[in-house]
Amino acid sequence: MNGLELSRGFFEEFGRPMLENDFSGLLPFLAAGLIGSGSECSGFDDAVSEDHDFEPGFCIFIPNENVPDRRDAFLLERAYAKLPREYEGYTRPLMQPAGGARRGVILLSDFIHERTGTYDGRLSVEQWFSTPEQDLFELTGGELYFDNFGLLSRVREELIYYPEDIRRKKLAGQLLLMAQSGQYNFLRCYDHGEPAAAQLAVFEFVKSCTAVIFLLNRKYRPYYKWCFRAMRDLPLLADTAELLESLMTSPNTAETVIGKADLIEEAAGRVIRELIAQQLTKASCGDLEKHAYSVNDTVGSPSIRNLHILTAI
């Protein structure tokens, strides 16, 4: 049983009856689900995940500290705390995780603010550029059981993915970084006698390439440790995950360095073919830098297009 299944079962057996029987007057203000931090919210959890912050719990979202009444919110917190401590062989912890409460009664305005810097989820261009992608992934992921108040559903719908000009600006910047780190600096670093620097160039290339692959799929990239797990399930370029993993785990030696340079070009070629398929570039070459500037030229808004190409990185 994974975390999503565990949470849903616990909610339906104990959470929903508690809310409907004891807090029917508050239901118009509430939302509930398993949303936020933790691999279980994304279906990435496994046996290893159960060593910390893994529990049969769920989130109850209330709009803010004044709606509903503070006393009602306090009573709701007490009722959640009194739910069974064990379920399906799992025990709810007595202490909160180091990062703060992930389950239980949560102020929705604070939850949204922690992830977007706004209390209503409406982002300016600058905020779209600066908001961490993993926070948008968490806010729009997980499972929402119900949302009677409607605010959380509205925010999740509006932030489901980047506006197209933002996507293209981010894509242009990451393509340029792929070109600089992989196509230009990898072999140069090795030829300088710096195999460690060459491997750093590989890491930078892989990091930017994964960002590009998620952008091409119109999917938010999760926290780095789940990036490859999520990439393997994408509809486009999923098989590139194996290629990128090979780049990162193989050494830089006289016997391997040319082969790694070829893998970099293979990954670049796959990305370029998808750029062309999505009509994002007019360049017709294998140089990622030229494609980066071509993608930037397709940004519709002049004010965004004319910003530095790395503005959105």
Image: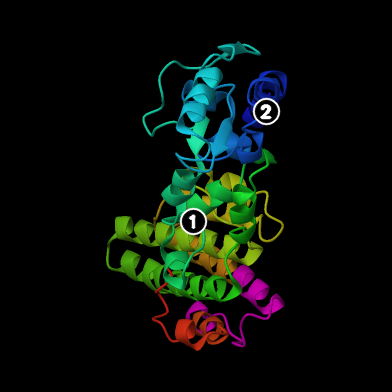
**Residue 290 located within the stretch drawn in magenta:** yes
The N terminus: image quadrant: top right
Residue 50 percent location from the top left of the image: 53, 23
Residue placed at 50% from the left, 75% from the top? 169
Residue stretch in magenta = 269-291
The residue at which mark 1 appears reads as 133
Residue 243 in view here: yes
Residue 47 percent location from the top left of the image: 58, 24
Left or right: 201 in relation to 6: left
Residue placed at 66% from the left, 40% from the top? 144
User: What amino acid is at disc 1?
Assistant: Glu
The C terminus: image quadrant: bottom left
Q: Which residue is nearer to you in this view: 210 or 118?
A: 118
The image quadrant of residue 76 is: top right
Asked if residue 298 is positioned above or below residue 45 in the image, the reply reads below
The residue at which mark 2 appears reads as 24
Q: Secondary structure at mark 1?
A: helix
Query: Cα distance, mark 1 to mark 2?
Result: 36 Å
Asked if residue 129 is positioned above or below residue 93 in the image, the reply reads below
Residue 38 percent location from the top left of the image: 51, 35
